Image: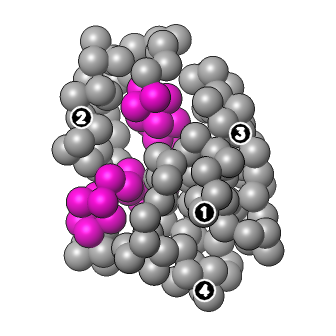
Amino acid sequence: MHIAYLTADEVNLDLARRWAQECGCQLSLVLPRDALPDSDGEFDAVVYDLDCPHPALRERVLTNLLTGDHHSRVAVHTYNLGQAQAQELRARGVLVGRRLERMIFRCLAADRGMEMRSRMPIDGAHLRIPPRLRSSFQAACA
């Protein structure tokens, strides 16, 4: 599985690389100045760091996710998302978390039917799994 990660945060990037590797995924960095990775289907999944210091980009990503079709699995993490927006994103199948967590990568990998290397504790209080992903996630973690 090939995951794009849009971030400008080096600490989050390092964590994302380790967690993606644990799940058997390949991670590619997409910088905020690059084109949004979700539009052409080049990646199996995309993770957006919406706390990166580019407000115009954040709004563009949110608008695309809330109004357009996304062709790959999508996750976002941010401390700056209202509850209504978060619920609307979840209703559209987007994984939403307050911070980057290992669980995001495990959910994305589980959704693609990839074999999990270890059981995941379901302790992601900050991550809400959309209803349409719960069954595949639970099956992968069983």
Q: Position of residue 115 (x, y in %)?
A: 48, 13
Q: Amino acid at mark 1?
A: Ser
Instruction: Determine if residue 18 is in view.
Output: no
Q: Which residue is mark 1?
A: 39
N-term-proximal mark, 2 vs 3: 3
Extreme residue in the bottom direction: 56
User: For mark 2, what is the residue?
Assistant: 134
Secondary-structure class at tag 3:
strand
- Foreground mark, 1 or 3? 1
The reply to whether residue 141 is in sight is yes
Q: CA distance from mark 3 to mark 4?
A: 24 Å
Q: Within 10 angstroms of label 3, few (less than 14), some, or many (20 or more) residues?
A: many
Amino acid carrying mark 4 in the image: Pro
Point out residue 95 in the picture as x, y percentages from the top left corner.
Answer: 38, 51
Q: Nearer the viewer, residue 96 or 98?
A: 96
**The residue under label 3 is which amino acid type?**
Leu
Q: Nearer the viewer, mark 3 or mark 4?
A: 3
Asked if residue 88 is positioned above or below residue 3 in the image, the reply reads below
